[in-house]
Image (cartoon, coloured by chain):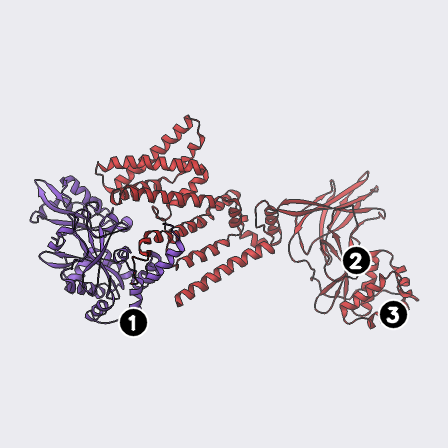
Chain colours: A red, B purple
Amino acid sequence: MLRNLHLVLLAALLTLLGGGAIAYKASVLGLPLLPDEQAEVWTVQARVHFQPRRQANSVRLRIPRRTPGFTIIDERFIAPGYAMLAEEDEGGRSVRWTIRRASGPQYLYFRATVVRGGSPDLQEGRPVLAERPALEEPFATAAAALLEEVRQGSADIASFARELVRRFNEPAPSQEVALLTQLAPEPLDRARLLTGLLAMRSIPARVIQGLPLAPGPPRPLRALLQVHNEQRWVTVDPETAAEGWPEDFLLWTVGAAPPFAVENHPRATLELSVERNLADALLLAEQRLEAANRELFEFSLFALPLETQQVYRVLLMIPVGAFIMLLMRNVVGVSTFGTFMPILIAIAFRDTGLLAGIVMFTVLIAAGLLARFYMERLKLLLVPRLTSVLIVVVILMAAFSVLSHRLGIEVGLSVALFPMVIMAMTIERMSIAWEERGPGHAIRQGAGSLAIAAVAYLLMTWTPLVHFVFVFPEALLIVLAAAMLIGRYSGYRLTELLRFRALARPAEGGPG
Amino acid sequence: MSWNPLAVARRLRQIGLLGLNRRNADYVLRHNPRRFYPRVDDKLITKRLALAAGIPVPELYAVVREEHEIRELHERLAPYEKFVVKPAHGSGGDGILVIHGRRGQRYRKASGLLLSREDFEHHLSNALSGLFSLGGHPDHLLVEYCVEFDDLFERVSYRGVPDIRIIVFLGYPVMAMIRLPTRLSDGKANLHQGAIGVGIDIPTGVTRRGVWGTEPVREHPDTEHSIVGLRIPHWDTLLDIAARCYELTGLGYVGVDLVLDRHKGPLMLELNARPGLSIQIANGAGLLHRLQAIEALPDPARPPAERIAFAREHFHTR
């Protein structure tokens, strides 16, 4: 019992490990459970447009660095003739394009391909008080009065910020708010003003700017407010006062600095557009993994060369086939030649197809058996005889291929993929069984092997399963656990019920 | 007859039928330490151990280990009219050659067929290179005394030697049967080769019921003599030998194969660490209840005589 407990615990642990890894990869890393699954992919484009001057031109564009909830899997800069320099600062990344001489309207592009991934929230950055606005009268009095009112209507830092925002968005704002709004007509200025007001109350706050990922016409960046409540950053929408990270929001830059600047060109424009597409989920998941979790990616099957990946698509299915084999032998009770021979045959079926495979296998074995029976009369020693059978098998295979090629049956060529050593051993064992136990027994065992090979083949080539095991090799841990559990299965085999059915007749067996 | 697997399984569990999975998991794996396997898998070692323990076995005439020894064998065997060649690691009676006499240069098999010297040598050479051994490892061969069976069995066996199989668990003989060769089995005493299995009542040593293939039988199909109600001679000695094989091998779950020789009485032929399950069909009863009765004993370790007494008290075959 104790031994069984140990086994059950071990199996449970393996299942948990495998299941957990699968759940993590499916839900967090977003690897698709089914093949041909589609996933959303956005192409985000920023276009800077300006009329150049007759002197050196310099353009600075902020570009996303951290993108909570999303992963940039590809980015591209299109600015012909410009020198490009990437820069990093507190607020994120920016790119600086410079050109000595340019003529005609200038268009510079930044294009990024973005997919979902990671948890959506931004907690990076130390809480720092924003710069307090130097307010003149009557603004200073208005601000002080407003903040005092807000203080009375709020409980903590987050609710203070929300209350403040709410007052700025009332349909009929109070006098103070109306006054202060004159200072900041634009949403970005408004957000900056809010951080300033919060700083007057010693509340660290910052502006973040991002792009709502929804298809539609070009739009400006949206500014959000983040206040630090001494534990974490709380995101507040400066227009609706809603708390929390908004959905489908691609963070572009941290800080209230304008997203782009062209030296001496006040009339330059920035146009942001979003395009949504569907793409193969597995491909995206791979790219996302590569972009976001470099280490994890490098230690996964996706990092292997493509041909090797193809090999593993087959190899990883062998345990599944072996498990079928195990079920058929220990639970059903089918007898086979050799423990794993049917699986090797099943792998050969991958190239021949099921029906053609079974026909070719049967023909080969039958012809081999004839040769083997003839050799029996020659009284050869064991190893020379096995070698002879092997040679005959190879000759038969070659003859089979040539013949079927002449007849125009191309599938006959794939006979070469049968594991010939295994075939030779099977023929030898079958002929021994034939003589020792009778033809019925030998044919039954041969048919059993073939049946298991067919079932294993069908399962080992079932696309959803192949995909699942390849993308989640952890599933093999679960197979391992199941195999170990069956290792302690002590119930009857299905065929035993048939074999001992005479004992089950009520008249026959009394309790022993 | 409609065949309902669930009902059959329930019924089989009721009569305590031991399945292959359970035999392996709960009895073979648990009670048979692998390091003792050579004691039963190599018939030469079995024979030496038995001789040392005073258990009667067929006399060993020769051992063949090398290919070249096969040719010398003809001369070495010249003194013996009858003999048996066995691969030391053979399983289930495979590869056993029974020679009942000679005609000129040729050997006569138990079936009456004549075997040329070349055929004889070929068979031995095959056996030597491991054709009949588990896993196909090179093997060695034993040539030993050919048992002449007791008159009792003359009428109920076709040519070969009937042998008695007793399952011994922790030294207790739990179930027994006698295997009768038929024309179908070519004189061999293996059930899967077509021999008849006849269940023996442990307390009395009387045969109770027979099974041929999967059919119950009461008469021998070749001789038409009744196979039930026969009293096995030397039953006490047979049980004693079987029970002592526990100490001999250290294996908790073992099948003991015995024969009754006309001149020498009971002889132990070989042991099996994974004895088959057909004995249950021959006895019309499952092994499990008997095995569990022994497992339930507070003090199963007793001297052989007491173990036999316990078995004779409890293990009836009706």
Do the residues at pointers 3 and 1 share their chain?
Answer: no
- Disc 3 marks a residue whose amino acid type is Ala
Badge 2 or badge 3: first in the primary sequence: 3
In-image side of A49 versus A454 (left or right): right
Residue holding disc 3? A144
Indicate the quadrant where residue A395 lies. top left
- Disc 1 marks a residue whose amino acid type is Leu
Front position in the image: B198 or A97: B198
Residue occupying image coordinates x 42% and y 32%: A413
Task: Give the distance between the C-alpha atoms of the residues marked 1 and 2, in whole angstroms.
Answer: 85 Å
Q: Nearer the viewer, mark 2 or mark 3?
A: 3
Indicate the quadrant where residue B41 lies. bottom left
Front position in the image: B250 or A117: B250
Disc 3 is placed on an element classified as helix
In-image side of A228 versus A428 (left or right): right
Instruction: Indicate which disc residue B297 carries.
Output: 1
Residue holding disc 2? A256
- Residue A182 can be seen in this image: yes
Do the residues at pointers 1 and 2 share their chain?
Answer: no
Do the residues at pointers 2 and 3 share their chain?
Answer: yes
Disc 2 is placed on an element classified as loop
Instruction: Indicate which disc residue A402 carries.
Output: none
CA neighbours of label 1 inside 10 A, class few (<14), some (14 to 19), many (20+): few
- Disc 2 marks a residue whose amino acid type is Ala
CA neighbours of label 2 inside 10 A, class few (<14), some (14 to 19), many (20+): some
Task: Give the distance between the C-alpha atoms of the residues marked 3 and 1, in whole angstroms.
Answer: 92 Å
In-image side of B175 versus A172 (left or right): left
Give the percent coordinates (x, y) of residue B55.
15, 62
Task: Give the distance between the C-alpha atoms of the residues marked 2 and 3, in whole angstroms.
Answer: 23 Å
Indicate the quadrant where residue B290 lies. bottom left
